[in-house]
């Protein structure tokens, strides 16, 4: 990854999409490598993603970008696409203006944008980070339309970094079979470490993330299902929003948590339930932890990953309806 950048000490803006915490989490892995090599890092994002970045690097400069306003109110991927499309297009246009203004003000050498398709500038090297180069959706129309848009936006960047293996992809067809010639496979991104923590002292870890209201609905379902679970339960909500749900008194509950503590909790967990977001999958894969992965209904990427990884690397696919 570092060999893809210009030589010398660089000023770099890192801008992850605020869609769950996955994009911010894997950008923290990139940040760690860049800081080790003496580069200056500036963050730009919004919402919980920006809060997670600031929680892990409070000494850095931060800039707020317009949010995409993504919502998952419908389990049908076509309706979800139509519901979110206007907000996505508006945000892409707005963030392009923000990128140019920040570039003029800060004069960065590099912009690294994780899935923010408009956050790029002509005045510096602009990199897009994405593992979704070949969208895998249920309907041929959404797959066709999505890949046309994907191709249009990704080609506007100077480089595309794919957090996956070139020869044996963790993300399946998502990161392969694409039409791009500026793609670089940089391997799975996670700053988790295999450390000698006390193992299996947490009986159940529930790790949540993702857009609302789907995140909150799943949270309530799991609280109801495991309310009387005997054993030590840790819930990482993945949101700074307050909940009205009464939590079981014996549970340990965190809203947002820094990556070092999350690394420790994952390694100590006997059983893990998580969304099938790719960044979570990379974290579990990196430390060799098995997990039950549950896709967000209507989110084609998560549904594809859950199907593809079911029975591999210790992952098992579950549906929300399995937790009644």
Image (cartoon, rainbow, N blue to C red):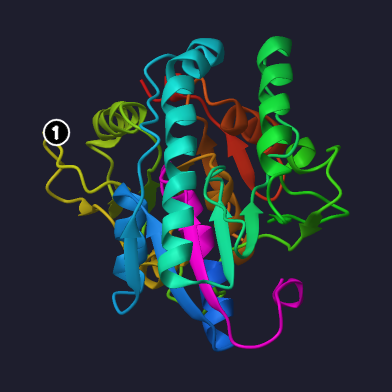
User: Residue 136 falls in which quadrant of the image?
Assistant: top right
Locate residue 308: give its quadrant.
top right
Verify whether residue 63 appears in magenta.
no
Image point 75% across, 71% down: which residue? 4
Query: Label 1's element?
Result: loop
Does 250 sit left or right of 229 as displayed? left
Q: How many marks?
A: 1
| Residue at the (67%, 30%) spot, across then down | 307
Work out which quarter of the rendered image holds the N terminus and state it. bottom right
Residue under pointer 1: 245
Q: Is residue 204 above or below residue 174?
A: below
Spot occupied by residue 116 in the image (x, y as percentages of width and height): 52, 45
Res 196 visible: no
Q: Which residues are magenta?
A: 1-28
Q: Does 268 appear above or below 252? A: below
Residue 275 against residue 186 in the figure, above or below: above
Q: Nearer the viewer, residue 9 or 271?
A: 9
As for residue 26 lying within the magenta part, the answer is: yes
Q: Quadrant of residue 106?
A: bottom left
177 vs 140, left or right, is right
At a point 73% along the width and 34% down the height, the residue shown is 151
Can residue 107 be seen? yes
Above or below 245: residue 64: below
Name the residue rendered at 73%, 37% in the picture: 174
Q: In x, y percent, where is residue 215? A: 34, 33
**Few, some or many residues within 10 Å of mark 1 (<14, 14–19, 20+):** few
Figure quadrant of the C terminus: top left
**Position of residue 14 in the picture relative to residue 231 (left or right):** right
Point out residue 43 in the picture as x, y percentages from the top left corner: 41, 65
């Amino acid at each position: 990854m570092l060999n893809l950048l210009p030589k010398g000490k660089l000023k770099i803006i890192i801008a992850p999409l605020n869609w769950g915490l996955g994009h911010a989490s894997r950008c923290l892995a990139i940040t760690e490598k860049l800081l080790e090599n003496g580069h200056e890092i500036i963050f730009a994002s919004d919402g919980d993603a920006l809060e997670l970045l600031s929680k892990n690097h409070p000494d850095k400069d931060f800039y707020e970008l317009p949010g995409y306003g993504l919502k998952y109110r419908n389990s049908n991927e076509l309706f979800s696409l139509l519901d979110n499309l206007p907000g996505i297009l508006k945000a892409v246009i707005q963030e392009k203006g923000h990128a140019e203004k920040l570039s003029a003000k800060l004069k960065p050498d590099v912009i690294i944008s994780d899935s923010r398709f408009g956050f790029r500038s002509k005045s510096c090297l602009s990199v897009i980070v994405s593992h979704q180069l070949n969208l895998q959706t249920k309907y041929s129309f959404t797959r066709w339309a999505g890949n046309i848009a994907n191709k249009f936006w990704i080609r506007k960047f100077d480089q595309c970094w794919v957090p996956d293996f070139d020869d044996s992809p963790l993300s399946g067809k998502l990161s392969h079979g694409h039409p791009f010639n500026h793609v670089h496979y940089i391997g799975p991104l996670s700053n988790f470490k295999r450390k000698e923590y006390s193992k299996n002292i947490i009986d159940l870890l529930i790790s949540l993330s993702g857009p609302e209201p789907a995140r909150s609905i799943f949270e309530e379902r799991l609280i109801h299902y495991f309310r009387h679970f005997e054993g030590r339960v840790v819930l990482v909500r993945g949101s700074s929003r307050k909940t009205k749900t009464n939590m079981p008194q014996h549970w340990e509950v965190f809203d947002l948590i820094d990556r070092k503590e999350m690394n420790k909790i994952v390694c100590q967990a006997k059983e893990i339930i998580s969304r099938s977001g790719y960044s979570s999958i990379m974290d579990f894969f990196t430390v060799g932890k098995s997990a039950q992965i549950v896709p967000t209904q209507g989110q084609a990427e998560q549904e594809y990953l859950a199907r593809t990884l079911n029975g591999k690397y210790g992952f098992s696919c579950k549906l929300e309806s399995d937790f009644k």
